[in-house]
Amino acid sequence: MRPEKTLSLPTDTEIIDNLTRDGHNRRKAEDQLFNGFIYFVKEGIRKYSLEEEEALDVYSDTIISAIEKITGGLFEGRSSLKTYLFRIFHNKCVDRIRQLTTNKNKIHRNTASPDLLSHLSDSAKSIVQHLVEQADFQLLKERLSELGDSCRKMLGLFADGYSDKEIAVAMEYKTAEVVKTSRLRCLEKLRQSYNLLKH
Amino acid sequence: MNSLEYIDDYFKGLLTDAQKEEFERRVQSDPSFAEELAFYINAQALLKDDLIAEKKERFKDLYRQNKSAANPALAANPTPVRRLRPFAIAASILAIVVAAWLIFGSQPGPDKIAGRYIDTQLRNLPVKMSSVQDSLQKGITLYNNGQLPEALNLFQRMLQQDSAKVLAKTYAGIVCLRLQDYDKALDYFQQLEADTALYSNPALFYQSITLMKRNHPGDSQKARQLLQLVVDRDLDKKEDAQQLLLKHW
């Protein structure tokens, strides 16, 4: 772990603490993490011969992936953040080069792979996968944009890994239960709106 | 509990194993429930996509800010230089050490330079082409034959008879130098130096050679000063003095 502390760069522990402890400092910690290893972009350009925009995109993906793992408790701290991040960055650079050389059209897809599917058993998964692939993402996107700011913010925070309790703190709700009820109501609203136009 | 809450609890890991099995069975037996599940999954995926897009946009702004603030981490090609810097420093030090060794380490000391000069320039004394063999010529012949003590003996006898004999004094000093009796050689050359009537006086030059050969502490520095004096005053053996200064200093 990086023990030293500089004026511009907090320690690994500080970043991890701010990412995991509560929602208040999370955005700041995300920015600190991004700024702390920003020179990886140059590495992507120099070492992997990526264009600056590609290198920045891969680096952003790296930070987002690392944030997800850290907040999900999957970062065990066996290596420094730098080593951990560079391993992810290296793998993503290799993937990106492979994508660039095989099929450029596949690089920018419209939706994230629904990783929640992996929670299901194989038999249930095959049924749901088929339904997921039949969805009209454009329509769903439009319906989502029509939800109120509060709903979108709440659903966004939940998708970002915030717990209902953390959302309650961040959005000044009284309890986590109130957040859960409100959030599921927002989701139900979206579903009805989507289904109405889909059928 | 409505379906979305049930699905929400499943993904949050709030269901028991039995409840999970029931959940899986319902997915397979209830098409409308499977549709709701597919919607939930797609909505989460879409929200996550938006989230990633929003974060990437934010990171782009941060990157631009870093670039416009001339963050050294993003300066034009700093990494290779930074990486190579220790090697460059090590290479520079090595180059300096090698150069110093070549210039100074491998250079012979003043005694060796003087020794080479003696071997090449003072191995033989000039012989006068004459049928008459005077004492000086006899001494030179003895010297050139390598009979140094005998030659010295002869030159000393000449000086006892006439201390003003310049060549005898010079040659006596040179023999002493060859015999490694440096103090005595210096004595002869200093006596020679005192002879201001000479048009051509190599005394200072020979003193320098002797001091270099003796190589006691301070001798080298004194020899350099004397050689520089020979050059500055345009004295006898000026060219040889210049050569020695170039070789050693």
Image (cartoon, grey):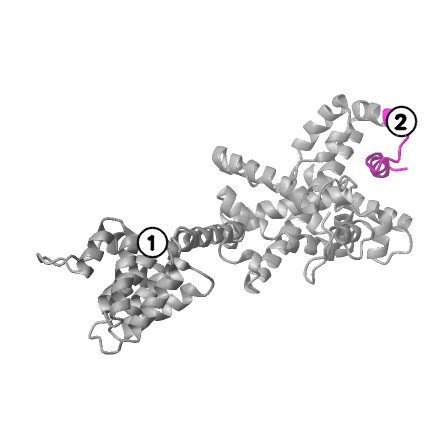
- Mark 1 touching mark 2, by CB under 8 A? no
In the image, which residues are magenta? B1-21
Specify the quadrant of the image occupied by residue B30: top right
**Badge nearest the viewer, 1 or 2:** 1
Question: Which of the numbered marks, if any, corresponds to residue B17?
Answer: 2
How many discs appear?
Answer: 2
Chain at tag 1: B
Which is nearer the eye, A189 or A102?
A102
- Identify the residue position indicated by label 1 in the image: B115
Q: Is mark 1 on a helix, strand or loop?
A: helix
Q: Identify the residue at the far front of this view.
A: B161
Residue flagged by tag 2: what amino acid is it?
Answer: Asp
Residue B18, magenta (yes or no): yes
Q: Image height check: is A95 above or below B96?
A: above
Residue occupying image coordinates x 66% and y 43%: A83
Distance, label 1 to label 2, CA atoms, is: 100 Å
Residue flagged by tag 1: what amino acid is it?
Answer: Gly
Residue B214 visible within the image: yes
Residue A91 picture location, percent across and down: 60, 37
Residue occupying image coordinates x 22% and y 57%: B139
